Image (cartoon, rainbow, N blue to C red):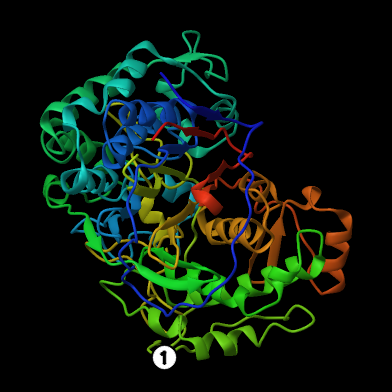
Amino acid sequence: MSLTRFCSAALALVLAACTPLSTPVDTAPATPAHIAAVEPFVIAANPLAARAGMEVLERGGNTADAALAVQAMLSLVEPQSSGMGGGAFLTYFDAASGEVIIYDGRETAPAQASRTMFLDNSGQPLGYRDAVVSGRATGVPGAVAALAMLHEEHGALPWDGLFDAAIETAEDGFIISPRLGRFLGIDFPQLSQPDAAAYFARADGTRKQAGDRLRNPEYADFLRRLSTQGTDALYKGSTAARIVQRTRAAPRGGTMTMTDLANYRPVRRQPVCNPWREYRVCAPPPPSSGAAMLELLALLERTDIASRGPDDPQAWYLFAEASRLMYADRDAYFGDGDFVDVPVAGLLDPAYLDARAALIGPRAAAEVSPGQPAGAPLAMEDLTHEPAGTSHFIVRDRHGNVLSITTTVESIFGTGRMVDGFFLNNQLTDFAFNPFQPNGDLAPNAVAPGKRPRSSMVPLILLDAEGNFAGAIGSAGGNSIPAYVGKTLVAAVDWSLPMQQALAQPNLVARGNRIGGEVSAFDPAIVEGLAERGIDLVPGQGEDSGVHAVLIREGGRVDGGYDPRREGVVLIGTP
């Protein structure tokens, strides 16, 4: 494979930041001023997946084509994070029109799902370890359907040639990476399930580990059928029947049917866009937390964080308090916008943001409550537990089309149940286990038939003042995703750090009264300064981000990076 540059752990491009300007809130980006051939790139969490995408670009494919190749490979080599049995949010920039389009491939609850499906016989919420491996945890998968919709509307190469790299790798096998090997050494309940245990077993019955070769001929066979039959290979026929059988099996079998699978449809949505610094930032609407991500950026813009830097404890204090305000609003109001009223416009109203930002005082607030933006219902207590899994990747072709996609099977290895070589998601555990508030009202993120659970995934596209592509970012990490993305954007834009340095900055996740992060990675002076301001950092939250990001710096130069906490890579090709 011919590449102009291969960027790995030792390399990132260093460029300058831009100056701010003000633009109005909008959901429709402007038409770009020009379109010219640009450097294509693929940024993904695994080198094999990134190379599969770049190979497609090099043989004349575009972003929509390459995305399918990347996802097919990730399902094989990073099965703990995403796959064909999961869901995704896609944020797509069409260079020809300047349009940003959202493809919502979030999983849906089956038609027979009930509000109380995660309660036990006494009416109490199930324990997470019981729920996560249950058949009822799996939603109707949406990633493949969403990518197929993207390909149908924007693809250049035939569908049947986009899975070759993953098919070959599944047949020949691949060497288990250190990251996958680390997860195989942890006592996740999913790994005790019969499907996962058999898949990762050595001949002597012990579990495979990093350095072992892992083959998956069943997955290769499925991809061949997907290649020739299209999405029917997943949503109809023998694979669909096996999905139904596995999800309905004990313990705690679910209610999914062949009809649920056949009726699944991804949703083409308008993005939520808002100005931030010199950019217009576009994100998926609910059930994504994209609007909450935009709220966080807007709150930070109302502070002096940009005049500070990573060595200033006040900068991290401002980030923490703004995060707490954002999370309080997100947790209270967000759910599937097709089922509940999410006050997106109210949350992004300048007057509301001014009032929320004014709550950031000299010391951390003892408690942070949700606000009352225009259009908001009564604020609800958050009853949702969202684990940290997921993967993010970014693709740009030589024509300038860009995809920022966050894709997931939810927690590590989904439910641990497999069909045709891929894991089934446990996405329905992103619903509130207890559907009722203490006063008896229904929670905004309660289960309902056909409903999509709330998500923290926020794949972003950034545009400049002329409507040209200016950047993309997203992350893995469950509830911590907005914090990971926010930290990276502050570091790369406000503090003018090269992207790879921005990604390497310590994570700080401030949600409610527990403020955690990479305590040992912070300078002790930062930890002490935060303590003086009423914030005691605790370890155990924020150590495992998976951010991939790119900014187009002055002169059109690409400043792309991958999270050093994972096994990512940046590949850049020729225009």
Task: Give percent across and percent down for residue 481.
Answer: 53, 56
Task: Give percent across and percent down for residue 486.
Answer: 58, 62
User: Compared with residue 280, is residue 459 higher up or lower down, i.e. above or below?
Assistant: above
Inspect the image, locate mark 1, and give the three-letter code of the amino acid beneath it: Ala
Label 1 sits on residue: 374
Query: In front here: 417 or 316?
Result: 316
Query: In front here: 352 or 382?
Result: 352
Assign a secondary structure to mark 1: loop
Residue 403 left/right relative to 6:
left
Task: Give percent across and percent down for residue 27.
Answer: 33, 73
Query: Badge 1: few (under 14), some or many (20 or more) residues near its Cα, within 10 Å?
Result: some
User: Compared with residue 498, is residue 424 higher up or lower down, i.e. above or below?
Assistant: above
Q: Quadrant of the N terminus?
A: top left
Residue at 55% of width from left, 53% of height from top? 554
User: Compared with residue 505, is residue 287 higher up or lower down, i.e. above or below?
Assistant: below
Residue at 63% of width from left, 54% of height from top? 16
Q: Is residue 126 visible?
A: yes
